[in-house]
Amino acid sequence: MFFYVVLMYAVVVLVDPYGLLKQGKKRDLYVCSALCLISFSLAFALSMHWEIPSPSEPIVYLIKKLF
């Protein structure tokens, strides 16, 4: 399963930044690259059946602190 994840992200990484580089949008390229790296990390962890902690508890805690 992880092979498919790596293959699909390889295609996205090769195709996606081309348009941003062609238009000269370097800041957008950096943001896109960072988000792609985060997304790849999560997809790879899920494909390897690693348990990812839920962020809901800290979010609920922060919301309760605000209100």
Image: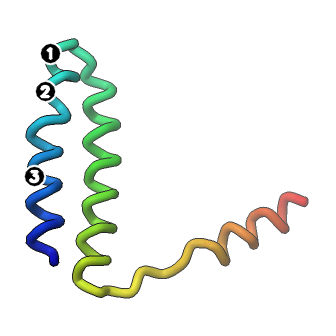
User: Which amino acid lies under the numbered mark 1 shown in the image of this protein?
Assistant: Lys
- Residue at image position (66%, 72%) is 58
The kind of secondary structure element at disc 1 is: helix
**Percent of width and height locating residue 31:** 34, 37
Q: 42 left or right of 56?
A: left
- Residue at image position (84%, 58%) is 66
Q: Are marks 2 and 1 in contact (CB under 8 Å)?
A: yes
The kind of secondary structure element at disc 2 is: helix
Q: Are marks 3 and 2 in contact (CB under 8 Å)?
A: no
The residue under label 1 is 22
Question: Which of 40/4 is in front?
Answer: 4
- Residue at image position (10%, 52%) is 10
Q: Earlier in the sequence, mark 3 or mark 1?
A: 3
Give the numbered dot on residue 18.
2
Question: Which of 65/21 is in front?
Answer: 21
Task: Measure the C-alpha gap from mark 3 to mark 2.
Answer: 13 Å
Task: Measure the C-alpha gap from mark 3 to mark 1.
Answer: 19 Å
User: Which amino acid lies under the numbered mark 2 shown in the image of this protein?
Assistant: Tyr
Give the numbered dot on residue 10.
3
The kind of secondary structure element at disc 3 is: helix
- Say above or below: 16 vs 64: above
Question: Which of 3/36 is in front?
Answer: 3
- Say above or below: 12 vs 66: above
**Percent of width and height locating residue 3:** 9, 71
Question: Which of 7/61 is in front?
Answer: 7
